[in-house]
DNA sequence: TATGGGGCTTCCCATGATGGGAAGGTCAAG
DNA sequence: CTTGACCTTCCCATCATGGGAAGCCCCATA
């Protein structure tokens, strides 16, 4: 049996976050020693590692909870897991596309900017310019 | 002179956020009517629009403040603005790469998962598996 | 046995940017 | 004068994480 610091080291989840996950119900309450220290066995550490990896893949905590439930359910259909993973891929793609769009706009502006000692700057001009609604009335 | 709701509609920044920007010092305190309503002229609306667009390009508020300062400084060198824009592009690239990596891992897992009625699932196996440090000792 | 240091406990606060909502004042139209 | 839409300030919630204080516990060492 480990106490929280050891479980944190073994799982890659900080002690702070372990307590938080417990508080929010993502993981069940840990056992306690007579003096109140939380205790963790290999199984609990494995759960924490699971959570860590799911978070590393960008799943929000709500989806991590879903994954954990499927993990615990020996009778789940793998299709359900796959759906969650595909939804996460789609969510990542949305965010990636948003950021690619920002990047493209910035790249255009940077290209148009001399980037020298003079004050003329298309970047600021664009940010400060009047609203240019395409096909506006 | 407009009051805050009109300025919000004209700039695309919500009234809530306008007050927040003022509170945090991003924008100077608005004028007030005798009864305490905030007032905004075309210049202030332009500033708000500037902020909005910079935020839309993903700049954090701190960098927006830097951009605003450069915008106000008629003697700035465009090189400074360009540096900020390039840094923002770099920051976006970092985040994009992180998400691409997540997506790639998930895509691998999804490909390996049958996605049918059976419970066998490489995705859960991977999340719950022992730590497999590549090129480990 | 006493002591020191480090780890544990709970509780509160902060982040970054935004929204929601309550309680109360103001203004314009009727 | 009433009604309703708008404004004001103030507090709370998000999402996931970290920082820190006050106080208890445990182990090692003198």
Image (tube, coloured by chain):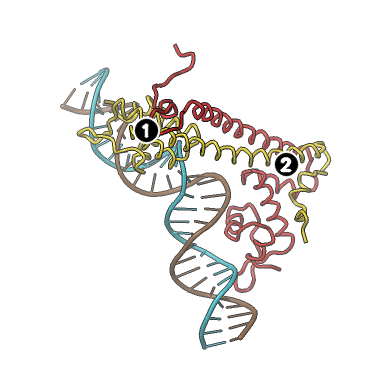
Chain colours: A yellow, B red, C brown, D cyan
Q: Position of residue B96 (x, y in %)?
A: 61, 34
Label 2: how many residues lie within 10 Å, few (<14), some (14-19) or many (20+)? few
Q: Judge whether A82 appears above or below D28 on screen.
A: below
Mark closest to the chain's N terminus, 2 or 1: 1
Label 2 marks which chain's residue?
A
Q: Position of residue A123 (x, y in %)?
A: 76, 44
Determine the residue positioned at 20% across, 34% down.
Answer: A34
Distance of label 2 from label 1 (alpha carbons): 42 Å
Determine the residue positioned at 47% across, 37% down.
Answer: A83
Determine the residue positioned at 66% across, 62% down.
Answer: B9
Q: Judge whether A7 appears above or below B19 on screen.
A: above
Nearer-the-camera pick, B22 or A48: A48
Q: Position of residue B125 (x, y in %)?
A: 41, 26
- The label shown at residue A71 is 1
Q: Determine whether the residue tagged by mark 1 lies in a helix, strand or loop.
A: helix
The residue labelled by disc 2 is A105
Determine the residue positioned at 60% across, 34% down.
Answer: B95
């Amino acid at each position: 049996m480990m106490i929280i610091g050891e479980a944190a080291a073994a799982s890659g989840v900080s002690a702070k976050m372990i307590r938080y996950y417990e508080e929010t119900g993502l993981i069940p309450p840990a056992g306690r020693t007579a003096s109140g220290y939380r205790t963790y066995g290999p199984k609990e550490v494995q759960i924490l590692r699971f959570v860590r990896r799911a978070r590393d893949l960008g799943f929000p905590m709500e989806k991590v909870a879903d994954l954990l439930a499927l993990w615990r359910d020996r009778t789940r259909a793998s299709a359900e897991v796959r759906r969650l993973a595909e939804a996460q891929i789609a969510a990542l793609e949305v965010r990636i596309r948003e950021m690619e769009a920002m990047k493209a706009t910035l790249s255009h502006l940077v290209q148009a900017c001399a980037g020298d000692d003079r004050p003329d700057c298309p970047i600021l001009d664009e940010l400060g310019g009047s609203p240019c609604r395409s096909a506006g009335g």
